[in-house]
Amino acid sequence: MEGLNDEELNFFNALMSSPKELSDQLNNVKTEVVK
């Protein structure tokens, strides 16, 4: 995990802490792209 900046660390923390929320966001993005 060395060489990561704060933004990337925050992203990884969010990834680890809330997979449900993240998958919901990804599904929303996919839906928008399909439209």
Image (cartoon, helix red, strand yellow):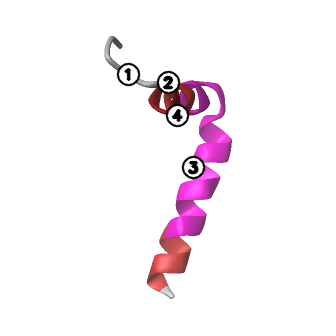
Classify mark 1: helix, strand or loop. loop
Which residue is tagged 3? 23
Q: Are marks 4 and 2 in contact (CB under 8 Å)?
A: yes
Q: CA distance from mark 2 to mark 3?
A: 18 Å
Tag on residue 4?
1
- Alpha carbon of mark 1 to alpha carbon of mark 2: how far? 6 Å
- Would you say the magenta stretch is mainly helix, strand or loop? helix
**Residue where numbered disc 2 is placed:** 9
Of tags 4 and 1, the one toward the viewer is 1
Which of 3 and 17 lies nearest the eye of the viewer?
Answer: 3
Secondary structure, mark 2, is helix
Question: Residue 31's spot in the image, x, y percent?
Answer: 54, 75
What residue is rendered at 53% in x and 57% in y?
26
Q: Position of residue 11 (x, y in %)?
A: 52, 34
The reply to whether the C-beta atoms of the residues labelled 1 and 2 are less than 8 Å apart is yes
Label 3: state its secondary structure: helix
Answer with mark 1 or mark 2, whichever residue precedes in sequence: 1
The quarter of the picture where residue 10 lies is top right
CA separation in Å, label 4 and label 1: 10 Å
Crowdedness of circle 2 by 10 Å Cα count: few (<14), some, many (20+)? some
Which label lies toward us, 1 or 3? 1
Q: Is 1 in the magenta? A: no
